Amino acid sequence: MTARRILVVDDNQDLADGIRYNLELEGYTVQISADGPSAIAAVRSWQPDLVILDLMLPGCDGYEVLRTVREQGGTMPVIILSARGEEVDKVRGFRLDADQYVTKPVGLMELLARVRSLLRRSGGAPGDGPAARITFGDVVVDQAARAVTVGGQPVSLTPKAYDLMLALVRRQGAVASRVELLREVWGTSGEVLTRTVDSHMAELRRKLEASSDEPRHFLTVWKAGYRFRD
């Protein structure tokens, strides 16, 4: 299947680059626009399969971008991703035919799940099929169903523990700091919350490892963070 194209429209370069990096890890082709007029032009010329759209943009705001795209016949799913969380903002977005409205900050795992869901409805997404199943040791993860089994028995993970597991697995052995994991899974980088990562890591080890005291898959890297080992 040809890689699906996603246009990220945001003038925050660090945020846009972070979203692009994670989308590309999932197998998508990504382009970034940093202002309203270039976003409209990119939709017309590149014809993305999905748009992630900020509202506060130079040139013209996200509402104007969305209105123009729809008036020009664009039918691709659009996720509004904005710091503006008032009900009136959301209603305006939906009246302009946005598919979803997500308030910043948002965990990247949640955003990826929303992207996958919308693209599946509109004709498939990377990872649909055999690649959507992850196996390591006695653990089988069905990403489409967000279901986990160990030795054939279903295991219940909290939503954030599940997202943390995927964030580590997709790094394929690379180390992730607690702050990086907070930003990716919880949508925050607050240092005071790093114990949150530790408590969810303990849940993963307790439920997925043969011995939580001697983990084989979810490893601590001293003074650095955590990594996954297949």
Image (cartoon, helix red, strand yellow):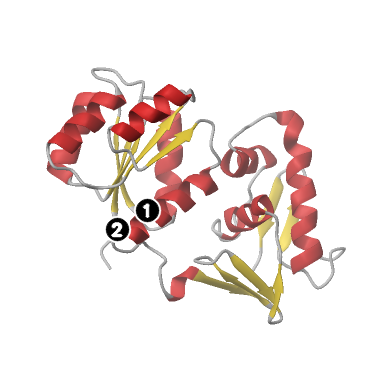
**Left or right relative to 66: residue 213:** right
Q: Which residue lies at the image location 79% right of the left edge and 40% below the top edge?
A: 195
**The disc label shown at residue 122, or none:** 2
Q: Nearer the viewer, residue 170 or 119?
A: 119
User: Which image quarter holds the C terminus?
Assistant: bottom right
Which quadrant is home to the N terminus?
bottom left
Name the residue rendered at 74%, 60% in the picture. Answer: 204
Neighbourhood count class around disc 1 (C-alpha, 10 Å): few under 14, some 14–19, many 20 upward: many
Name the image quarter holding residue 182. top right
Q: Position of residue 22 (x, y in %)?
A: 46, 48
Please state if 65 lies on the left or on the right of 167 as rendered: left
Q: Are marks 2 and 1 in contact (CB under 8 Å)?
A: yes
Please, is residue 191 above or below residue 134 in the view? above
Percent x, y of residue 91: 39, 29
**Residue at (30, 32) in percent of width and height:** 95
The answer to whether residue 221 of the structure is visible from this angle is no
Q: Quadrant of residue 119?
A: bottom left
Label drawn at residue 118:
1
Badge 2 crowding class, 10 Å Cα cut-off, few under 14, some 14 to 19, many 20 or more, is some
Marks 2 and 1 sit apart, C-alpha to C-alpha, by 6 Å
Q: Nearer the viewer, residue 174 or 108?
A: 108
Q: Amino acid at mark 2?
A: Ser
Q: Secondary structure at mark 2?
A: loop
Q: Is residue 105 above or below residue 128?
A: above
